[in-house]
Amino acid sequence: MRIVNPATEEVVTEIEFADAAETDRAVERAKRAFAVWRTVAPGDRARLLRSFARLVGEHAEELTQLEITNAGHTVGNARWEAGNVRDVLDFYAGAPERNQGRQIPVHGGLDVTFQEPLGVVGVIVPWNFPMVIMTWGVAPALAAGNTVIVKPAEWTPLTALRLAELGLAAGLPEGVLQVVPGTGEVVGARLVEHPDVAKIVFTGSTEVGKRIAAKCAGQVKRLTLELSGKSANVVFADADLGMAAASAPYAVFDNAGQDCCARSRILVERVVHDDFLDRLSRAVQRVRVGDPRDARTEMGPLISAEHRDRVASFVTDPPHATGFCPPAPGFWYPPTVLVPDGLDDPAFTEEIFGPVVTVVPFDDEADAVRIANSTRYGLSGSIWTRDIGRALRVARAIEAGNLSVNSHSSVRYWTPFGGFKQSGLGRELGPDALSAFTETKNVFFSEE
Ligand code: NAD
C-alpha cells in the first residue's frame, strides 16, 4: 500500500499488508505471550509501561513528524497527540497495582473477587487520530494483563508501527504488543472472527461498527465501540456571544473536521442567530489553513482525494461563508459554513467528517434540546449560556456522552469517554478503563 502525504500528495513509503494467515500467526504469538504477561508481577508490568511512556516522550518529536507526514496533522496537534500517547501510557502504568477486587461479607467463609485479564485483545483503529486512538485501547488493555494486536487504518499505519517498536525497546516481551497493518476486510475481519481473540475495541464508522457487533455476537465476544457523531453546539442568547462565535470554528474544523467529536451542528437561539452567524463567518475567514509543518497553521488537509470528494458532495448549495483553501497539490477543502434548508438536510443530519458546519436557529430551551437530540448519534456537544441552572438542565437533557459548558473541551485521558445511542457502546479512558479489559471472577472460600 502506498502511503501518501495528504499535504503534498507525495508517496512517503510503501507498506506491505498482512493477509489472514499472517493475522492468525500474530494471534498465536499474542496467545503465547498472554500466558507470560498475565503472570508478570503488577509492579513489573507498571515499570514496563512507565518505560514505554518514557521512551515515547523521548521520541515525541519523531512521532510528531511521522503523523504530520502520514496524516497531515498540524504540528500543534501532532505534538499534543504524541504527548497524549506518553501520558495515557503513564496514567495506566499506575493501574496494575490498583486493579483491585473486593472482599464481600458472607456467612461460613470468605468471598473475594478477582479482575482477570481477558486474553488477546484486537484494537481496530481509524485514520483520523491514529496514535492516540490506538493508545486509548492499548494502555489499559496491557495494564490489565492482556496482550494486544493493533490493526491500524489502511492510510495511516506509520505511528502505530513505530509505537510497537518503542514498546519492544522499552522491554515489553515479544508478542505482548503487535501491530498488523492490512485492510479492514482481511486483517480487521480476521481479528473479529478469530476464536482466540477475546475482545475487540473498534473505533470507526457506525456502519462498520454495526457489522462488527453482529459478528462478535456469534461468539459473545467482548466489544467496545467508538463510532460516528454529529454533535451539537448549543448557543443561548445570554451566552458570551463573542467567545462562542470565536471558538466555534475550532470545535468543528480541528483536524480539518475529521474528528468524531466535531460540533458540526450549531444551534443558535433565534434572537441572536443572525448576529452569531456574522461573527462566525468572520471567525471562519480567519482560520489559518495551510502547511501543517508551520506552527501558526490551524487547519491542514483532508486525508485523501476520495475523502475530499465525499465531503464536497454535501455542499450542494452555495455556502453562507468559506475560509481559505490552499492550491493543489494536497487534499485541501476550505472551512465552510452552511445554513441548511431544513432539519432533514443531509448536511445537517449526516456525519460529513470534514470542515463543514451547519447553523440552525431554535426558539427556546425545549426546542434546543429537541433539535440537539434529533439524531441517531450522541457522542459530544457544547452548551453556551451564563445561566447555570439552564446549563445544568440542558446538560442533563442532551443525549451524549461528553458535554462541555462554555467551552469545547477535548478528551481528557483521566475522564471517561464514549457515545450514547449509535455513537458507541462502552467507555474508554478515565478511572474505570480497566473494567473494559477484565472479567470479574467471584470466589468463595469455605471455612470448613
Ligand atoms: P471505518 O469504519 O471505515 O474504519 C475504521 C477501521 O475499521 C479501519 O482500520 C478499517 O480498516 C477497519 N475496518 C473496515 N472494515 C472492517 C471490517 N469489515 N472488519 C474489521 N475492521 C474493519 O472508519 P474510518 O473512515 O477509518 O474513520 C472515520 C470514522 O471513525 C468516523 O465515522 C468517525 O466518527 C469515527 N471515529 C469515532 C471515534 C470515537 O471515539 N467515537 C473516534 C475517531 C473516529
Image (cartoon, rainbow, N blue to C red):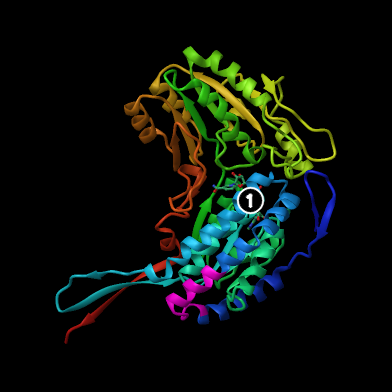
- Label 1: how many Cα within 10 Å (few below 14, some 14–19, many 20+): some
Which residue is the site of mark 1?
79
Q: Most extreme residue toward the bottom, as rendered?
A: 448
Q: x, y percentage for residue 16?
A: 79, 65
Q: Most extreme residue toward the left, as rendered?
A: 107
Please state, as top left, top right, bottom left or bottom right, where the C terminus lies in the image: bottom left
* Residue 320, image quadrant: top right
Residue 41 in magenta? yes
Please state, as top left, top right, bottom left or bottom right, where the N terminus lies in the image: bottom right
Res. 7 visible in picture: yes
As drawn, is 346 to the left or to the right of 93? right
| Depth order, front residue of 102/384 | 384
* Residue 51, image quadrant: bottom right
- What element does badge 1 sit on? helix
- What's the magenta region? 37-51
Q: x, y percentage for residue 142?
A: 51, 69
| Depth order, front residue of 330/189 | 330
User: Which amino acid lies under the numbered mark 1 shown in the image of this protein?
Assistant: Arg
Give above or below for 265 relative to 363: below
- Is the CB of mark 1 within 8 Å of ligand 1? no
Q: Residue at x 31, y 28 (%)?
A: 389
Q: Residue at x 52, y 35 (%)?
A: 231
Q: Residue at x 58, y 54 (%)?
A: 83
Res. 221 visible in picture: no
Residue 413 in magenta? no
Give above or below for 443 relative to 295: below
As drawn, is 112 to the left or to the right of 3? left
Q: x, y percentage for residue 73?
A: 69, 46
- Provide the major secondary structure of the magenta segment: helix
| Depth order, front residue of 296/182 | 296
